Amino acid sequence: MKLSKKQKNFSKFYLIIFLLISVTACSNLKKICIDNQCFKVEIAQTPEEHSQGLMFKTNLLKNEGILFIFEEEKKVSFWMKNTLIPLDIIWINKTKTVIGVTKAKPCKEDPCQIYNSPDKIKYALEVNQDSRIKEGELKF
């Protein structure tokens, strides 16, 4: 089957878009550890990235997640709207000490449950539920 010039250009366009998305997604991954447990994480620093979080992800590898970094230490609230997998939210203060872990369930209908940090935090790490993290220090 021979492709027309238009079909070839269309295919090239989508290949370029796919490659750009792949490169962008990979370039934002960072290795972090809490004690001896390490994760490859996306970094969420902007309000837009905070809002998106892990929404619509259908799976997450065992040692993957997302690290939310806030400009200043403060109390925060999370919800699981459009989040399809159960997560542990690991609350971390400005000294990079784990101050709590919350088990969060996917929200299937409104209103969604709100998960509040136990105190002021600078970081929140979302990983697959049952990460077994209870305490420790965050290391970049």
Image: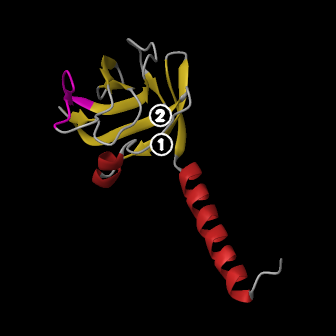
* Label placed on residue 14: none
The answer to whether residue 63 is left or right of residue 125 is right
Using a 10 Å C-alpha cutoff, classify the residue at mark 1 as few (fewer than 14 neighbours), some (14 to 19) or many (20 or more): many
Labels 1 and 2: the sequence-earlier one: 1
Residue 12 vs 32, above or below: the answer is below
Q: Which residue is farthest front?
A: 1
x 68%, y 87%: residue:
6
Residue 5 position, x and y percent, is 73, 88
Instruction: Answer whether residue 17 is magenta in the image.
Output: no
Residue 48 position, x and y percent, is 31, 54
The answer to whether residue 127 is left or right of residue 8 is left
Residue 138 position, x and y percent, is 43, 24
Q: Under tag 1, what secondary structure?
A: strand
* Label placed on residue 65: 2
x 45%, y 42%: residue:
57
Q: Under tag 2, what secondary structure?
A: strand
Dominant SS type (magenta): loop
The answer to whether residue 131 is left or right of residue 100 is right
In contact (CB < 8 Å): disc 1 and disc 2: yes
Alpha-carbon distance for marks 1 and 2?
6 Å
- Mark 2: which amino acid? Gly
Q: Which residue is mark 1?
A: 42
The magenta segment = 111-121
Residue 35 vs 6, above or below: the answer is above
x 64%, y 62%: residue:
19
How many marks can you see? 2
Residue 82 position, x and y percent, is 33, 43
Viewer-proximal residue, 59 or 74? 59
Residue 112 vs 97, above or below: the answer is below
- Mark 1: which amino acid? Glu
The answer to whether residue 125 is left or right of residue 33 is left
